[in-house]
């Protein structure tokens, strides 16, 4: 049947258009939280809670999150290397986010992210036991994608013996040469430390960041981290001031909120319904269903088409309603007659017995000469 073929053709055209919609760019995240340090006195309360909270927020924003909780040096190195590899393979539109909570310290200009199995008793020993952040930053910078976000809540005080530090007791170095596809956020100013906030379940920085990711992900990353900076500064009475280094020169207005899927130009929707049958039109006429009759006419029903073997058209059959339903609503019958006539129904058309709609309507057996429809037919 031709009408069914048209429906199927329209369906396949629409399906082909929908199938051509581009997929969203990959959104990848590596989230690390180190708290259960094996060396006595190094334990922290919140980093795992912090990492889990950020992982939850990122997942809600469409990120594929790889979590690593209480990672050893080997586990951290494997995870960071795999993350860089995945990011490179994801293409130029991919977004990468790296979040770290735990001990972190600067040594000779390198920012060391401290694993839980560290046994160092001096900074010189620590540099061989903690992965440098710069290695991952280099991998992310060289991935070729436009956006990478590095978030470091790693400024807790490092409990090395005082005589073994050869430098600051904690804090991270300022990575001033920020790649053009990266933004680096610090929980506090480089070179300073921030408390673990053991009286609560999350650090002040991460709690504030999570709130912003939940409520304002549509803000640009610069605006979002500026708000985090101001709120943490106020909440800590000016003791802790987060900072960030902006390098997103290829996507300066990037937002954590996923962009809408790219629009595609679909062909106009084609609604094809099967042709109206004689029985459908006859039923609508008997019930004086003006809405259905108008719909049938719009769908292509010819008002002068015969409905039966005797050659009666819709207008002939309408006059016979008077006999079938003597108590019919005369005004509705007039409305239907007007619809048919306006659509081109021929008032003078004869059936097999040479009767026109007028001669049928005039007969006392049907409508009679006093029926209001007579004014339309004469």
Image: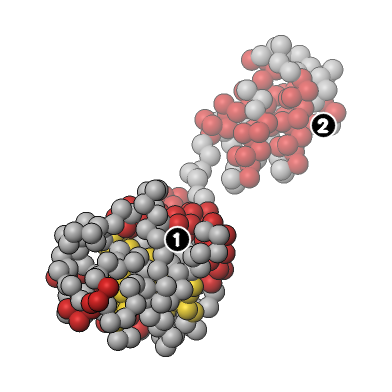
Residue at 62% across, 39% down: 295
Residue at 53% across, 72% down: 222
Q: Secondary structure at mark 2?
A: helix
Q: Is residue 138 above or below residue 25?
A: below
Residue found at the far top of this picture: 327
Is residue 92 at all visible to an observer of this figure?
A: no
Where is residue 60? Give x, y as percent. 40, 54
The residue to which callout 2 is attached is 376
Relative horizontal placement of residue 179, taking residue 295 as reference (left or right): left
Q: Which mark is residue 205?
A: 1
Report, in whole angstroms, how far the alpha carbon at label 1 lies from the one at label 2. 82 Å
Q: Which mark is residue 243?
A: none
Q: Quadrant of residue 119?
A: bottom left
Instruction: Tell us which disc is closer to us: 1 or 2.
Output: 1
Q: Secondary structure at mark 1?
A: helix
Where is residue 215? Give x, y as percent. 53, 54
- Chain-order first, disc 1 or disc 2: 1
Relative horizontal placement of residue 14, taking residue 48 as reference (left or right): right
For this rendering, which residue is in front, 92 or 218? Answer: 218
Residue found at the far front of this picture: 163
Residue at 49% across, 73% down: 243
Where is residue 109? Give x, y as percent. 33, 86
Relative horizontal placement of residue 299, taking residue 329 as reference (left or right): left
Is residue 209 at all visible to an observer of this figure?
A: yes
Q: Quadrant of residue 223?
A: bottom right
């Amino acid at each position: 049947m031709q009408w069914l073929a048209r429906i199927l053709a329209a369906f396949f055209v629409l399906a082909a258009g929908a199938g051509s919609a581009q997929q969203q760019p990959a959104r990848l995240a590596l989230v690390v939280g180190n708290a259960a340090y094996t060396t006595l006195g190094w334990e922290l309360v919140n980093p795992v809670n912090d990492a889990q909270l950020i992982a939850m927020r990122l997942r809600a924003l469409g990120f594929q999150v790889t979590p690593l909780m209480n990672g050893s040096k080997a586990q951290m190195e494997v995870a960071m290397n795999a993350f860089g590899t995945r990011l490179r393979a994801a293409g130029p539109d991919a977004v990468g986010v790296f979040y770290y909570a735990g001990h972190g310290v600067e040594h000779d200009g390198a920012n060391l992210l401290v694993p839980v199995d560290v046994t160092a008793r001096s900074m010189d020993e620590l540099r061989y036991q903690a992965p440098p952040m710069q290695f991952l930053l280099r991998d992310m910078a060289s991935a070729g994608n436009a956006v990478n976000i590095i978030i470091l809540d790693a400024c807790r005080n490092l409990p090395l013996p005082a005589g073994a530090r050869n430098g600051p007791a904690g804090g991270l170095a300022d990575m001033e040469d920020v790649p053009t596809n990266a933004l680096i956020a610090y929980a506090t100013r480089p070179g300073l430390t921030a408390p673990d906030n053991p009286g609560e379940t999350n650090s002040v920085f991460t709690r504030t960041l999570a709130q912003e990711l939940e409520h304002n992900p549509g803000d640009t990353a610069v605006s979002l981290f500026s708000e985090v900076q101001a709120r943490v500064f106020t909440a800590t009475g000016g003791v802790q001031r987060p900072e960030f280094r902006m390098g997103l020169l290829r996507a300066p207005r990037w937002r954590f909120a996923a962009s809408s899927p790219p629009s595609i130009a679909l062909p106009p929707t084609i609604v094809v319904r099967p042709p109206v049958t004689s029985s459908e039109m006859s039923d609508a006429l008997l019930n004086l269903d003006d809405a259905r009759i108008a719909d049938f006419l719009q769908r292509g029903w010819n008002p002068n088409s015969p409905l039966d073997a005797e050659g009666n058209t819709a207008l002939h059959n309408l006059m016979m309603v008077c006999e079938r339903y003597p108590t019919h609503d005369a005004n509705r019958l007039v409305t239907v007659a007007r619809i048919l006539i306006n659509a081109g129904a021929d008032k003078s058309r004869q059936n097999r017995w040479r009767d026109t709609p007028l001669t049928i309507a005039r007969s006392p057996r049907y409508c009679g000469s006093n029926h209001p429809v007579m004014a339309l037919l004469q």
